[in-house]
Every structure is written in C-alpha cells, then in structure tokens.
Amino acid sequence: MSWRPLWIELRRSIDAERNLGYTDGAVIGGFSRYAQTMLTSILQKLSEESGPFKARLALWERQMSNYRSLSKAERKKIVEELAEALKEVEIEKPELFQKKEANQQEAQAKASSVQKGPGTAIQFLKGVGPQRALKMKKMGIETIEDLFFHIPFRYIDRSQIVKISQIYGPGEVTVAGVIRAYQEWQPRRGLTVIRGRLDDGTGILSLLWFNRKQMMKQYPPGSAVMVSGKVEYAYGKAELTVQEIELQEEAGLHTGRLIPVYPATEGIHQRYLRKLFEQVFQNYRHILEDIVPREVRQQLDYLPLDKALQALHFPHSLEEAENGRSGLVFDEVFLLQCALHYLRQQKKDTSRGFVHGRGDEELRRFWSLLPFKLTGAQQRVIQEISSDMASPRPMNRLLQGDVGSGKTVVAASAVVKAVSSGYQAAFMAPTEVLAEQHAINWQKLLAPIGIAVAHLSGSSGRRKREEVLQGLLEGSISVVIGTHALIQKDVRFKKLALVIIDEQHRFGVKQRSALWEKGKGADLLVMTATPIPRTLAMTIYGDLDVSVLNERPPGRQSIKTYHLSSKTWPRIYNLIRREVKAGFQAYVLCPSIEESETMDLAAVEERYEILSRDIFPDLKVAIMHGRLKKDEKASVMEAFSQGKIDILVTTTVIEVGIDVPNATVMIIEDAERFGLAQLHQIRGRVGRNSHESYCILVADRLTEEGRLRMKAMEKSNDGFLLAEEDLKLRGPGEMLGTRQSGIPAFKVADLTRDGAIMETAQIASRSYLEKYPQLDNPESKALRKKIAHTFQGLDLL
Ligand code: ADP
Ligand code: MG
C-alpha cells in the first residue's frame, strides 16, 4: 500500500481532533498515538526524493509522543501547526500526490514537454486523439493553457471516508476496504447485476454494479479499493450502487477527496477530465506563467497562478477552492487593467495636448446668465474638467450623471473654455432627434455670450452641409453638434481641441475613436446618463478619469412610479387628464423593436388613434416616431417643448436626453420589454421641474425577472442603485452592449460578486504602471508578453 491513503487518513483524524476540541479522542486509542503511527508509516514509505519533507515530518512524529501531557492550548497549537505543515507539503510538492508513472512514454512526454509552452495544442496530451480534441475545441479548449482554465463549477464531497459499521442511513458515501468476492446475476436479458462484498475491518458492505462485468477483472477479489456511491436499503440491508471506484493505491482522483465537477459534454466525461488534469498538473505545470510581477504579488494574499489552479482542481476544502478562484480573478482583472492602461498610453502621445488657458471671464459671464445657480456637484465637476483642459496632457474623462443631473451645462462650460482659448469643439449625440434638441438648446445657451453653434446632421441639405464643412475647415465655426455625421471623412477641422460624446455607450468604439482621431491630442469628455456600476466601468474604461454628478438640481422630487396592468387604462387616462388640466404634459411611450425603416408602427399608431379620437378628442395629441421626416420630427419636438402639444404618443426616439421640463407624466406601454437602465432613462424624461411627476409601467405577462425589474423601478429613483440591480439581473454582457467593446470577456471574474477583488486589482495595476509606465523592467516581461498576445488589435479609446 502506498503512503497516500495514510496521508488522507491522517488529515481526517486531524480534522476530527479539531472538532472534538483537542481531547486526544478523535481515534480510539488516542489521536496522538494514531497520528504518530501514521507519520511513522508515511515516513517509511516516502522515497528519498522527498528528503527535506521527511525531516519536517519526523519532527512532528516526535512532537506527538508527549501530546497527552500538554494543555489544551498547547495541543491546539501543535495540531494546527501539523495541519499547516501537511498542507505546505501538498502545495509545494504536488507531484508527490500524483500517481507515479513508471511508464517510459510518459517520461518522454515529460522530457519533451519542457520545450512546450502554454500555447501547445492539447493533442500532445496522452489520451487526447483528434476526435476528442475536436470535441474539446467546441468547448473552447484548444491549448494546454485553455485546459488549465477549464475550471470546475462545483464539487462533490468524497473526502470523508466512512467506516462500514458507521453507515446508518441512505446517502452518498465513500468507503475504503478490500473486495472479497463477486456474484453475477442476470434478472433479464440485457441486464447483468454484479454484486461485490467490501470488507473494511468494521463490517461488510454490499456493492452493486449494473452491466459492468469488466469490474470483476479490473478489481479482482483481494483488491484494496476506495469506493464512492449511493447507499440504499433493500430488505433492511445497506447496498452501495457504485459511482466511482479506484485502487487505494491510486485513490485520490475520483474518490477520497473533494471531487471537481467540470463543464463536460458528450464524449468528454468527468472521469476523463479528472484524469487529464492529473496528467497536465504532473507534466505541464511549469508552462503556467505568472504574469503578476513579484513585487505586486508580495503585497497581496492572492494565490499565485499555479497554486490557485491547483487549489481549484485539487482542493482539500471548499474554502481552498474559493481561494484559488479569488487568485484567478485577481490575475484576470490585473491583466486587463494593466493592458488598458498600457495600451492607451502607447497610443496617445501624452505630452502633446492642447492647453486651454483662457476663458475664466467668459465662464463667469456664461454662468451669470443662466436661469439657475449651478449645483455644488456641477461646480466641482466643471473644476475637474477645467484643470484637465488647462494642462497639456490630453484629457480623458468620463462624466457620469444620472438623468436630469444637469450634464449639458457642464459640457457647455467646457465648450466655452475651449472656444475662449481659441479652439474648436465638437459634440456628438447618438440620435438625430437628440442632436437636433441639443443644437436648439445649445444655441439658446451660448448665444448670450456670443458663441454660435452649428448643426450637422445626416439629413442636412447639401448647401447647408457644404457651408458647415467649409466653416469647420477654415475655423470660422467654433462649435458643431451632430450625430455620427460628424465622423464622416469629409468633416475636417482647423483646430479641434475638445471632443464631447454624449450618451457615449450608444456609440461603437470605432465611432468614438473616429471622432477623436480628427483632433489628435484633443481633450476628450465622454458623458453617460446610464450610470455604470463601478465594477463594469472599471472593465470598460479602466484608466479613464471619472467625474460623477451626484446631486440633482434643487427642488426635484422623486418620480412616483407604479406598475399597473393594462386593465387599468381608464385610471391612467384619468391621471393624464388631471395633469394636463393642471397645465402639464404627458408622454405615452410604445415600444418599437428598432428605429429602422422596417419597424413595426402598429403599436404607436394604434395608441395614437385611441387617444386622439376616442379618449382625448378635446386635447392636443401628437405622434412621434423614427419614420417621420426629419423636419416633421423637429417641428413636433419644438411644439411639444413649447407646450403646444398636451400628449405625445411616441416610440423610444425620445428615450435619451430629451428635455421638456413641463412634462410630468410618462406612461410606458409593454414596459417588460425594456431593461432597467432603459426604463430609468425613459422615466428621466419627466421629473424635470419642481412638481410631482409620475411614471406608469404598464405590463401584463411578466416573467419572474420582469417582475423584479418593475419592483426595482417602483422602489428606486437612483440610477446607480438600479444599475447595480440591472447588472445582477441581466449580467454585464447584456447590460451595456459591452460585447461590442472588443474587450475579451472574463473567464473567471464575475462583476456582480467580485467587486472587492476587482478594486484591489485596479489599485495594484495603477500603482504598478505609475512605477513602470513602459513595462520595460525585467519583472514585467511575462505581463507585457501576455498583453501583446491577448489584446492584439484591440481598438481602444
Ligand atoms: P442630463 O444630465 O440628463 O443631460 P440636463 O443637462 O438635460 O440633464 O438637465 C436637466 C434639466 O435640469 C434641464 O432643464 C436643465 O436646464 C436643468 N438644470 C441643470 N442644472 C440645473 C441647476 N443647477 N439648477 C436647476 N436646474 C438645472
Ligand atoms: Mg443629457
């Protein structure tokens, strides 16, 4: 018998002694004597190669002899130290815990694997032929490194070895003993029942197999085995249906430990995967390259890569597996953060930005002419942006502010500063309607201080377009607002030094960087009203500086939100009528899948018909959707914002940014079709003055998740809170369309639960890059290589 099962026994007895409070009672005859005997046998069986460990174990063997005479505290100390020592051996010498392979082929493979790197194809592994390789490829496993990262999603506990005499009820157990005899029985054609008798010295247990005659040859009577399976009672007698069996000598892979359960597929079974992992850990562990530099590692508690993987694939406890997982999460996030930081740095010439040195006086005048006083948050954020702009380092700032928090005037302040300093500024909005609204708004905002604003849209007439293009090129136009029309090739600037992107997540990365390219070194401000949970922001933006508008303009009330069924339309109509009577306006929003030519207008047209003809013939009802002509849209919006329309029946064209403070009612039909972030955005169209506003979510057949969304909306007006909720409900990929960002998805990290580790990783990566901005020190070699390999061609902004 090898020493390995003894080791397992020893660990078990240590656990038991701990549980009994160090009474030396874990084993009949005394724990200390038992442990001593075990250690002696292990020492005898350990081979020479494990020399240093033998010395350490011998020390413990001696310590055990006077265990009985010690106080409880002293005993505790010894037991815990012994447990720790065993664990250390396991971690430091994992090869001891793997099956010995005298096999020559294997030895050769081992020798040749020295030259193999992480990218080596899995076909090199024993037992992986072309067919299996293909199946694994479908699971995303192509290289040995991929395989290492194929991590278990749960564990089955087979670590406790139960004595047969102590089996009292049905359930899963693992027992160790010797097979005494087999019986074979064929109750009917096609079914062979094999019954074996297992003897562990405390009793005899009946083992059961179905149609597995080969068992009898593989484990002939006399074999010492470890068996896991389900115990059931037949005629009052315990019977174990065997799920896993191993020779005791080899035990520890499928039985006798916490057994990992992997994502598997047809033809790639659990047993096969465990076997593979035994092999890769034995022969290929050295190909794992720890990308985290030593000086970062030393300051943190996370397990280094190979130990983390060992802990995940071969854990002794769930806690250990969890520690392994944390280690991988840290590595993964650290890598991404370093990559974002490093690559952006490479791309940008950080020394040559524009210095916006003037504008203080103009800004004071601008603010004094506003119909309101800036909030504290607005003043703070404007200050942050101003000092970025005044420095020669190009600004790279994200402005996050909940809907209605007043981002526009912040952006306008930046524009005033740029123009006063003699530069041009461009403002890009995601939809035509919004760009149009902004253009009108900004003209009003900036006219009093003598700054003209041009508007460039996809549907601008040719002559007007030429005029604007000419003005931008010559520099006679200082401020331009538009949609992606701004990024077309023929749009050229004389000295573009400030780029502002509104509702930035609506643009693809390519579009964003295209605009930025037009003004090399320009200061960049991206704004979003869809608050992004910290963890998610971190992965997408990493090194961006972030400003947060966390204060609403004064006098705003929270929007009363109710989820109602469509049976209650009459009550909803009453609410609309009441508010219109009081001089306010209402939106009725009907979902359309997409703003496209082919979109389904039925819903919005039908609702418009009902409202304008049957319910409110006396009120002014208008319809708005993406298929209206551009000037039709503009005139409807203009009429609505001037209060000439009472009720606007609309699609999601008004979702973002539209600002008509006199509207106090938002009805959202089929609200279940929208995600939380979008619902919050839409709701944000009301509640823009000091009167009470209402949002009614009309939804009938809700999924459980949908119900939670409606509840979250009713409960909270806080965009950040809702965003966290959204992240939990939908996951990061769905949430902001981050898939299109081109940033590879995390393999292990989970944005909804790993926030703390992610923050640690971000801080660590930032300070490391501050120290080694070029990553050109020898310690960063693995990191730099990995970045180049993983993030090749990533389009960053
Ligand atoms: P968002 O952050 O959603 O883009 P806006 O910039 O459109 O918000 O501002 C929302 C509304 O609040 C606008 O009508 C704007 O004029 C008004 N507003 C902005 N700042 C203030 C303030 N400090 N006090 C009062 N009203 C303000
Ligand atoms: Mg806005």
Image (cartoon, grey):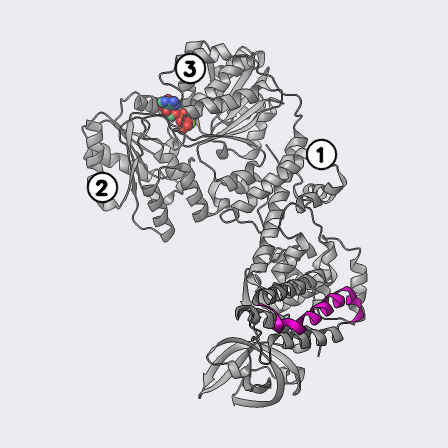
Disc on res. 774:
1
Which numbered disc flags the more N-terminal residue, 2 or 1? 2
Quadrant for the C terminus in the image: top right
Disc on res. 236:
none
Foreground: 208 or 648?
Answer: 208
Disc on res. 569:
2
Question: Mark 2 Cα within 10 Å, few/some/many (few <14, many 20+)?
Answer: few
Q: Amino acid at mark 3?
A: Trp
Q: Amino acid at mark 2?
A: Trp
Which residue occupies 40% across, 19% down? Answer: 441
Foreground: disc 2 or disc 3: 3
Which region of the structure is painted magenta? 47-71
In the image, is the residue at mark 2 within 8 Å of ligand 1 by its beta carbon? no
Where residue 297 appears, as percent x and y from the top left, is 67, 46
Q: Contact, CB < 8 Å: mark 2 with mark 3?
A: no
Does 363 lie within the magenta span?
A: no
Q: Splitting the image into four quadrants, where does ligand 1 fall?
A: top left
